[in-house]
Amino acid sequence: QKEVEQDPGPLSVPEGAIVSLNCTYSNSAFQYFMWYRQYSRKGPELLMYTYSSGNKEDGRFTAQVDKSSKYISLFIRDSQPSDSATYLCAMGEGGKLIFGQGTELSVKP
Amino acid sequence: KAGVTQTPRYLIKTRGQQVTLSCSPISGHRSVSWYQQTPGQGLQFLFEYFSETQRNKGNFPGRFSGRQFSNSRSEMNVSTLELGDSALYLCASSSLGLYHEQYFGPGTRLTVT
């Protein structure tokens, strides 16, 4: 079993939809949780960063961490075609940084 | 501010050879991390250097090594290349380290034949 599980998709939604991306993990020691966005042929860019549990909002993006369920989510409101990319969750602690496989998202105009 | 740069962008090597990849971080960033990205395994953390010292290391064999210079530039070396080392190698720089905001470079695409 992988330490971090992420549904690879692909996920296709119409423009304006709310998108929910999720990751589960098995290592209860993880304290740092991140979401990255990666466009084709580019390096990943950090979208959201959370330490420990809770919610964090930044514009159209909301990140949630539920440590009791070992589950993290990224919500994208009013999705745009420019949001079409691969979204990677990442988490770590104690020298480890583990990425999910990435979810490929396509937002159709 | 200039972003993270990586050289070369593309590289073709033969099995058994060694290769050195270079990464120049954002000015002022002291942390440089390296990653391997493949379709099968996804993005995997190799190691992090901070102020010339290796601070964290992922689960890769000793054939993968790195170093960081006093100007924060970093190099990654892979010896005795295997076909499975074909991947996109990404480096990222940060002012604070592995668990904080990292800025990724465009990557070096390594093909081993």
Image (tube, helix red, strand yellow):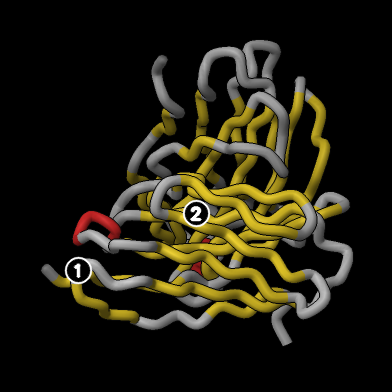
Asked which secondary structure carries label 1, the reply is: loop
Q: Residue at x 27, y 80 (%)?
A: A12
Asked which secondary structure carries label 2, the reply is: strand
Left or right of residue A105: residue B4: right
Give neighbour class at mark 2: few <14, some 14-19, many 20+ (Cα, 10 Å): some
Which image quarter holds the N terminus of chain B? Answer: top left
Q: Is residue B91 visible?
A: yes
Which image quarter holds the C terminus of chain B? Answer: bottom left
Name the one closer to the observer, A76 or B25: A76
Q: Quadrant of residue B52?
A: top right
In the rendered picture of this protein, how many numbered marks are placed on residues? 2
Classify B1 as above or below A19: above
Classify A3 as above or below B111: below
Question: Where does the image place residue B54, in percent across and percent down from the top left?
Answer: 80, 35
Outermost residue toward the bottom in this view: A1
Name the one closer to the observer, B37 or B16: B37
Q: Residue at x 57, y 69 (%)?
A: A73
Earlier in the chain: of badge 1 and badge 2, it is: 1
Question: Where does the image place residue B102, in percent across and percent down from the top left?
Answer: 58, 37
Cα–Cα span, label 1 and label 2: 21 Å
Q: Which residue is mark 2?
A: A36
Q: Residue at x 82, y 37 (%)?
A: B55
Q: Which residue is mark 1?
A: A15
Q: Chain of mark 2?
A: A
| Circle 1: residue type | Glu
